[in-house]
Image (spheres, helix red, strand yellow):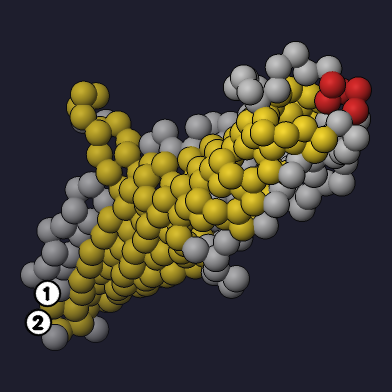
Amino acid sequence: MKKSTQRQKKKSGTAKKVLIGFLAVGLIGSFGKTPEVSTASASSAAAFSEVSVASVDLQNGLAEGMAHLDFPDVGTYEGNLQDGKRSGNGTFVWADGTSYAGAWANDQINGDGVVTAPNGTTWTGSFAGNAFQNAAYSVKGSNFRGTVTLADEKNQANLTFTYPDHLDAKKTVDVTYSGDLTKAGEFSGNAAIGYPNGDSYAGSVSNGQKVNGKYVFQNGDTYTGTFKSDKMCDGSYVFATGQILTGHFENGVPNGELTYTVNGVKYKTTWQNGACVSIVKA
């Protein structure tokens, strides 16, 4: 029997559950529906000019082998059929451009495969029942790469983001993120962040911004406390040489009354927008 591709249009039929409702900061959107393969009529089955199947049941429209199936307003499937159901390897492309390429079983996405979002982001891993599983997936986008581990309560991300170096347009720099990723796709929870200049942060984050934790500067200085709009707010700045400045920071610089400690001796200091205007021994 000649090998070619059978092609037919299908009604959407009974919709399967949405593959995933997980949004990862633009990493990938929610998937469309992957409907069941509805029964083909005898006339449509007989209309194939060439059939690349081992057998075709004209009465029930069941086929085996390679096929191209069109689901109006939903998407297309190209791949293997067994007993009229998608099984083996196949690719489904949704109307919005999202695609899945990989293993199928009994008309569902089951096994290893790759999901590609319309923006080009890929998720590589194991799927079951038309859905992501609680497992680790390798992800890659236009400026990031790494793994995302899905779980019932809290997702984990280990990603490296690459950006242009503002000092040299010919170079790039990396920022690493290792920590929580919410079901809504927000970088919120606890995390460790590494910066290209050698600075690092460990603590809580919200929407990718620092909230409360410890920031270590590459020169050995540290800041421990709260952050507002990703900048130092209320806490203690410890210099590598041992001095400590404790109090309020506005837009990341000391402002107002702060306590300055050096060699165990405390001083009351007053600051205005990062400049010390007075100092007296406490």
Residue 109 visible in image: no
> What residue is drawn where x is 55% and y is 65%?
134
36 over 94 or under it: above or below: below
Res 219 quadrant in image: bottom left
Estimate the x, y position of residue 97 in percent, counting from the top left.
63, 29
Which residue was labeled with disc 1? 242
Comparing labels 2 and 1, the label whose residue is closer to the camera: 1
Q: On residue 122, which mark appears?
A: none
**Along the line of sight, which residue is nearer the eye, 247 or 3?**
3
**Along the line of sight, which residue is nearer the eye, 201 or 273?**
201
> What residue is drawn where x is 46% and y is 47%?
124
CB under 8 Å between discs 2 and 1: yes
Which residue was labeled with disc 2? 263
Q: In which quarter of the image is the N terminus?
A: top right
| Residue type, mark 2 in image | Asn
Residue 264 visible in image: yes
Few, some or many residues within 10 Å of mark 2 (<14, 14–19, 20+): few
| Residue type, mark 1 in image | Gly
217 over 7 or under it: above or below: below
Lateral position of residue 203 relative to residue 169, left or right = right
Estimate the x, y position of residue 55 in percent, counting from the top left.
72, 34
**Along the line of sight, which residue is nearer the eye, 229 or 82?**
82
Q: Quadrant of the C terminus?
A: bottom left
Estimate the x, y position of residue 62 in percent, counting from the top left.
80, 38
Res 100 quadrant in image: top right
